[in-house]
Amino acid sequence: MDYARMKFYCDESRCIECDGCSVACAEAHELPVGISRRKVVTINEGIPGKEMSTSIACMHCTDAPCEQVCPVDCFYIREDGIVLHDKEKCIGCGYCLYACPFGAPQFPRDGAFGAKGAMDKCTMCAGGPLETNSEKERHLYGQNRIAEGKVPVCAAMCSTKALLVGDAESVSNVYRARVMARGGKGSNSPYGWDKAYKNQ
Amino acid sequence: MTNSLGDIQKSKSIIIFGANPAVNHPVGFQHFLKAKERNNSQLIVIDPRFTKTAAKADIFAQIRPGTDIPFMYGMLHIIFKNGWEDKEYIDARVFGMDKIREEAAKWTPELVADVTGVPAEKLIQITTLYSKNRPGTLIWAMGLTQHSIGTSNTRLAPILQLALGNMGKAGGGTNILRGHDNVQGATDMGCLADSLPGYYGLAAGSWKYFAKQWGVEYDYIVSQFKDASWMEKNGFSLARWWAGVAGVKSDDKIENAGTTLKALIVMGNGITSVAQQAKIKEGLDNLEMIVLADPFVNEAAILTDKKDNVFILPAATQFETSGLVVATNRSAQWRYKVVEPLYESKADQDIMFELAKRLGFYEQYTKGMLMQETKDGKLEMIPEKKTFTWPEDATNEIARIIKTIGLTGWTAERVKKHTDNWHMFDEVTGAGMGPMKGEYYGLPWPCWTKTHGGSPNLYDTSITVAEGGMGFRNNFGLEKDGVNLLAEKGSFPKGSKIETGYPEITKENIEKVLGITLTEEEKAACGANWKVDNSNILVQKCLEAGVCPYGNAKARAIVWNFPDHIPMHREPLHSPRTDLAQKYPAYPDKANHFRVMTKYISVQSAADYAKDFPINMVTGRLVTMNGAGIENRASKYIAALTPEMFCDIHPDLALKHGIRNGGMMWVHSPEGTKIKVKAKYSQSVLPDMVFMPFHFAGYFQGTDRTGNFPAGTKPYASGESVNTVTNYGYDIITQIPETKGGLCRIEKA
Amino acid sequence: MKKSIILFIALLGLASVAYAADSQIWGEMRIQNILGYGQEESWKLGPLFTMLQHKYFAWIFLGVLIGVPAAFFIHYKIIGPKVFPHSEKKYYAFSLYNRIIHQVAAVSFLVIIPTGFIIVFGDFFGGGTFVRMAKNLHGIFTIPFTIVVIPMALMWLKEALFNMDDVKWFMILGGYLSKEKKPILAGKFNAGQKMWYWVAILGGITMILSGAMMYFLDFKMEMLHNLAGMSQIDLLRAAAILHNVMGFIVLALFITHVYMSMFAIKGAVHSIITGYIEEEELKILHSTWYKKLKDQGKF
């Protein structure tokens, strides 16, 4: 079977920094406070004509840098492009964070002297390597909505439908339609796609 | 809201005064964004702050707080000067535009620039853009209303729309964004100090109508009051109830039947987000009893020093009860219960039923739900019906009684059907498809009959009354000073039998106006006018003739029963421009304004506030919270986003006072109160103003009061309430506090 | 000694400040993580680190681990060790204080270096608990080294300053390429030992600081921020690169140090255990120092 490539796209013309995605994510996966798998960032805040907001999480990159640098090789990439990792293998070294163009990896602080626990990041609501929808998977990786045929919770909750997720073709079509409707204004490719998907 | 959120997608231009939908209506804001995308709509934002909404605007004007009237007159000045107004529309449908024209002539772009701080070129640019891209819709929210001249602001905005012929058009209208879930429904149901439900007012005739509909004697209701005269007077308002409590230091004289307020019951109102917190605290401290019914602890209980007779009742949330709610566009939606009330909490209505039982009027209170109309226009007890079903019977009672705004069609059955078939309606127009064809989603009022499909856009004459069309309402007589107040010839809803203006329909005039004859049975059955007609025959006959029951009149630019006949600029009571306060002074003080003397000019002229309090202060909302914020601050993920009370301050202003980003600062108000908040550098405010959100409570003038929370109820985040330092000042008609234009002084803490 | 304790406490204090303060890495700072990755104006350390770590670091470590011992093995076979008689007079060269400080550092290195290898080749060990434990030991055993590194630097500083003897020493590579026992110009420490001193001290401090940054992630160094104008994520990436590169050097010299003391000079290791050095050993390998001691009448 030919799997569709799953991608995220946040339309910065539509994102209004409402934080609905990040709160929905934290609630759905019951994350510890301070771990933000998804985060809305705003640059040039308060400057007319320049202010821009976008929602950032793991982009599930093509040739994911995190996967390349991991010393314990805990990452694995699904056929639909979703980049996941094995928390039981992860040693919390932080290398994936240094490699990541999106600041996605998060590290809870467990243990003495601020030792970092296993890395946590967006799973595109696809759980982890454990048995699908098992108690342990939910505990370690959060909900597995993809397995239930549901849209990742961030995109489902997006108030202005700025944040989209889906197979590459559908997402590209929505993006093109919006750019066309705006009379071609805006960037040539979705923000972050050059780094994440090498514009493929 | 005359149109709807979806209808905004049809606008060619959108002008927003004092509203921040990107933050306060994030889901609704997608329609604004889609209008930009699909319709190349021009988004214009007028606000003292560079808001998240402004960040998406095509053009943004940073206005001085409280100067919307000069700005709008400036626009009208340019419109009239260039002849961009819709002359035909004005002639046929507007009364008194000449007076507006005269006033607008005074407001040259240069004068407007001096008063508002917006450069003349920008005003011209905005006016041109807005006039050239029609239909344009005008949006506002609390930024226009929360001023001592709030009523004037909200009158001039529709006048601007009338001048451009934008009213009563798809993609046009004045779309006022409601700030809370079901606040439109709450207003419609008369959660007001000056009206019975359905805007029937407080006149004896209205009381008698309701007495009849509720199945109780008018005299019984009178017996509940000191005497009948008090039934027809406004009550205390939410803004100033505290003035009525004995022991509150205030020189504002009250007129409350010779007594004071003894007890306060609060149901779901964050009274810690109302202006004059220090006074509210005094009011609370001096009451004999306080009852607070909320799903979370109402922070009034934290604010007060009162130790005894403070009761906190656990009210159920909206998920634990069901019923009809009304959206910002006047449409209804059914809300189903998700879970039974948790623990010992009770739904609001159950709390009220229990209260009514104990006060001894439960039977009278609930009787209306057991009644129905008969074919001959009478009312009777429904045979065999002994108990009511909540909330269906209450909904049907509302549909039976509230005619003024056309709720007749809102039976529980119909509203549920709409909600259940949500997917069968168009996102933009709300028009139904398939089995729901001919109806608009949620039956936006007026929904004249049990088969009428609702009215998507108010005052739209391009469609028939049966489809939701109508002219302007005839509510103020037929003529004024010899000028016809009815619409002129040629202006009428499509398909009307009468092709000119006509008065509202009464039993007396129906035959003459419609040119029909009623049978004797019909005559016997129908009420005096369409608003009190249980038989609904008058409305039926109107619809058959394509006539709107409330008449077809002109919109009034002149309101001769208000202090300002046309909207006039008056500086805020605390103005940073003392020179302009002399030129555009506040109203004379108003005695017995919602039972309490309310000051205007005596406050404004008492001191040169700008000297000691040189900084503008505006308040507003954060996207993460609503209202007083208690339920949001009790959510750990939301509290983590805004964990502390803060003040947006421009770095230039902050550095002048030695305040560091993230450092603490004091904000002092002319009322003599102060709050200690964290400074947050922001480019979104000008260096002469600060912005603070009003969602925090738990601290008062620098002291932590969170120890007052019952064990386990303290929220994750607490902070100073900005309303401790919002200034004195209330609207002349509605008494809404002037929180969007005040002054303060800051210092490093 | 006191100084080092203060330093240690200060370091812990700093770490706990970092613990309590707002995170510098995620939260609001994510923006810098994104901007600092590969944009025109940034140092582009993200892709550089990714490339180095993905393709080179592990191989270089493996190369050093195999290559350096291999070279010494050949040296041992061809030239052989230097053997000095152990019956002659001895000189008491290292005090108890010297030896304790050295031993603490030695033990630290004996844990830090193998655990470092386990981390580098974590995939070989299968990740999980074992490698996580190695990572934690790697961090924990930095603490004793952190305590002794300053005293060690101070106690041998004078002897570790380079002088003209060292140029000559380097020209003949300390005579290790010859079997002859001809006196070689060197003070208490020869140029090779001095090199190891500086790598162990400066390199060690570099490793401590870069390691601490990586360990705590938001261990904020205001001075470095101001100095380099780098964002935290850039500093972390720089730290990761530096930690690896410095790792090669420290590792190479550590192996050399061990080879010299254990194999190349038979019994040399005893001097740091007992404190005594054989007179013959001094005469040949540290002739300048020997002359000086003789002038002082120590022999």
Image (cartoon, coloured by chain):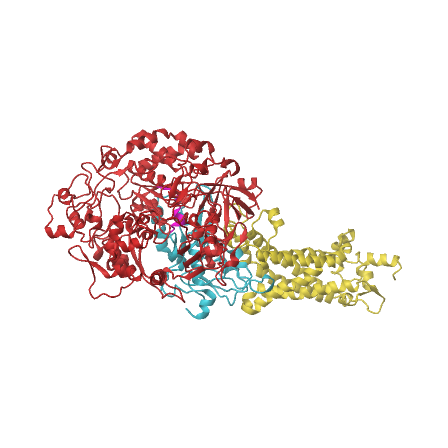
Chain colours: A cyan, B red, C yellow
Residue beneath the point at 45% across and 66% down: A128
Whether residue B134 is situated above or below residue A32 in the rendered picture: above
Residue B558 rendering spot, x and y as whole percentages: 29, 36
Q: Is residue C191 highlighted in magenta? A: no
Q: Where is residue B312 shown, x and y percent of the image? A: 44, 60
Q: Give the range drawn in magenta.
A: B15-26
Give the left or right position of residue C179, taking residue B229 as reference.
right
- Of residues B308 and B130, the one nearer the viewer is B308
Name the residue located 65 percent from the left edge and 66 percent from the top edge.
C111
Q: Which residue lies furthest to the right in this view?
A: C297
Number of labels in the image equals: 0
Q: Can you see residue B133?
A: no
Q: In which quarter of the image is residue B378?
A: bottom left
Q: Quadrant of residue B557?
A: top left
Q: Is residue B531 in view?
A: yes
Q: Tell me residue C253's x, y (percent).
A: 68, 60
Q: Who is closer to the viewer here, B501 or A72? A: B501
Residue B229, given in percent of the width and then of the height, sits at 31, 47
